[in-house]
Image (cartoon, rainbow, N blue to C red):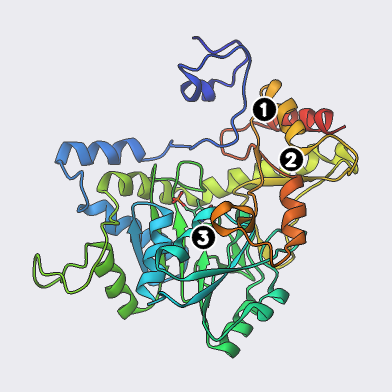
């Protein structure tokens, strides 16, 4: 079906084949307008399509440089990057890792994959990140690490996290999947801890289709991660496997896309920040219907998602607001459900009132580089109409 008149022409390919009766604004969309095509064609033309080739090392180096770290270890997605990081750090059965309950499920799942137990903490009401003041009460003799997650692109308040980690002898593993380009007190997300992981899923700040990476600055950790990523094969003896590893390698094709994306990282971040600025302006008219996202004075926000909270307790429910917006062609997405509410992790012994509350009221608005100011103004108008 031909896209209807008035559709932003840059959305046409995104929507071709969809049955559409009106212009829809998607919540996320990749922007692939750099060297992606040329680099992928180079993979095909040279037949370097599998997990060796020039783009893998180049992409790893580009992300390490962007995050001010020494090493990048590319993986086939962000979840395997987290698993690889925890496995390489030697976290395993009997250990505990402190994880925010308000996060994407992969943060907690990766802890389970190594046989350890995620111990949840509640979040801060304003920027939704784990509340450092609540960490210490969750530490036990089994705690090995803290996993701060820079949710929706806003960095975690890392100084208090590091104070606790140092005092209690814990490692810190940043789940920076949503925060490439964010910074804490001027230092890039990803450079702030023992190691950090990124995701390059199709909706993230930059994408490789599916992909991930661990970044860090420790030579022996680097050897361990590369060993585990490549089936545990001895780098000096082919088909000799001293440990049980995984096949978590990234393909050269994915890395080709990633390198082209990384070359334009500053541009991709600038367009996201411009979208956030437009939302701030156009949502000023919302008055006290919603709460807009904040950036702490020490934070450089990557705006993976522009997240609002419905503020009127007696207004329409979050799901109702999302339904009304979908009806008029604006795709939104609910804030993550806190992990402690999910069946595999159900925790009724402890309370997480802030996460329960913000999760029930939070909506992510379309946030990506293809949006025009007109699109943003329309989303803002529809949100205000739906929430009133
Ligand atoms: C996207 C994401 C991941 C996992 O990434 P995938 O590439 O989808 O496996 C992990 N943690 C957080 C917080 C994420 O947003």
Query: Gap in Å between the C-alphas at discs 2 and 1?
Result: 14 Å
Vertical arrangement, residue 119 with respect to residue 343, above or below: below
Location of mark 2 (residue)? 279
Comes first in the chain, label 1 or label 3: 3
Circles 1 and 3, Cβ within 8 Å, touching? The answer is no
Which quarter of the figure has residue 81?
bottom left
Location of mark 1 (residue)? 330
Vertical arrangement, residue 32 with respect to residue 362, above or below: above
Mark 2 C-beta closer than 8 Å to ligand 1: no
Label 3: state its secondary structure: helix
The residue lying at 88 percent from left, 44 percent from top is: 313
Kindly identify which numbered label has been placed on residue 107.
3
Horizontal and vertical percent position of residue 329? 66, 22
Horizontal and vertical percent position of residue 365? 67, 39
Quadrant that contains the C terminus: top right
Label 1: state its secondary structure: loop
Q: Which label sits in the foreground, 2 or 1?
A: 1
Query: Gap in Å between the C-alphas at discs 3 and 2?
Result: 29 Å
Circles 3 and 2, Cβ within 8 Å, touching? The answer is no
Comes first in the chain, label 2 or label 1: 2
- Residue toward you, 27 or 42: 27
Comes first in the chain, label 3 or label 2: 3
């Amino acid at each position: 079906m031909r896209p209807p008149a008035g559709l932003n022409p840059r959305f046409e390919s995104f929507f071709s084949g969809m049955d559409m009766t009106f212009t829809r604004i998607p919540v996320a969309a990749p922007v692939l307008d750099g060297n992606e095509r040329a680099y992928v064609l180079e993979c095909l033309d040279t037949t370097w399509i599998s997990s060796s080739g020039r783009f893998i090392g180049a992409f790893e180096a580009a992300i390490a440089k962007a995050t001010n770290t020494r090493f990048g270890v590319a993986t086939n997605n962000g979840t395997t990057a987290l698993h690889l990081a925890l496995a390489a750090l030697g976290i395993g059965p009997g250990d505990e890792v402190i994880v925010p309950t308000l996060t994407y499920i992969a943060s907690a799942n990766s802890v389970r994959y190594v046989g350890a137990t995620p111990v949840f903490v509640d979040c801060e009401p304003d920027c939704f990140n784990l509340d450092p003041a609540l960490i210490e009460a969750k530490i036990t003799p089994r705690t090995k690490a803290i996993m701060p997650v820079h949710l929706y692109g806003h960095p975690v308040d890392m100084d208090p996290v590091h104070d606790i980690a140092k005092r209690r002898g814990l490692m810190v593993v940043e789940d920076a999947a949503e925060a490439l380009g964010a910074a804490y007190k001027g230092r890039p997300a990803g450079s702030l801890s023992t190691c950090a992981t990124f995701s390059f899923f199709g909706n993230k700040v930059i994408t490789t289709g599916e992909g991930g990476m661990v970044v860090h600055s420790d030579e022996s950790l680097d050897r361990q991660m590369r060993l585990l990523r490549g089936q545990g094969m001895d780098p000096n003896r082919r088909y000799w496997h001293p440990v049980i590893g995984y096949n978590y390698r990234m393909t050269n094709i994915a890395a080709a896309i990633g390198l082209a994306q990384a070359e334009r990282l500053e541009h991709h971040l600038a367009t996201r920040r411009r979208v956030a600025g437009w939302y701030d302006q156009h949502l000023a008219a919302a008055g006290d219907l919603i709460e807009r996202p904040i950036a702490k004075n020490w934070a450089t926000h990557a705006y993976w998602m522009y997240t609002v909270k419905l503020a009127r307790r007696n207004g329409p429910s979050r799901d109702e607001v999302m339904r009304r917006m979908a009806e008029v062609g604006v795709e939104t997405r609910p804030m993550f459900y806190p992990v402690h509410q999910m069946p595999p992790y159900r925790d009724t012994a402890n309370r997480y009132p802030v996460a329960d509350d913000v999760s029930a009221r939070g909506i992510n608005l379309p946030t990506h580089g293809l949006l025009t100011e007109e699109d943003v103004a329309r989303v803002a108008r529809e949100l205000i109409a739906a929430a009133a």
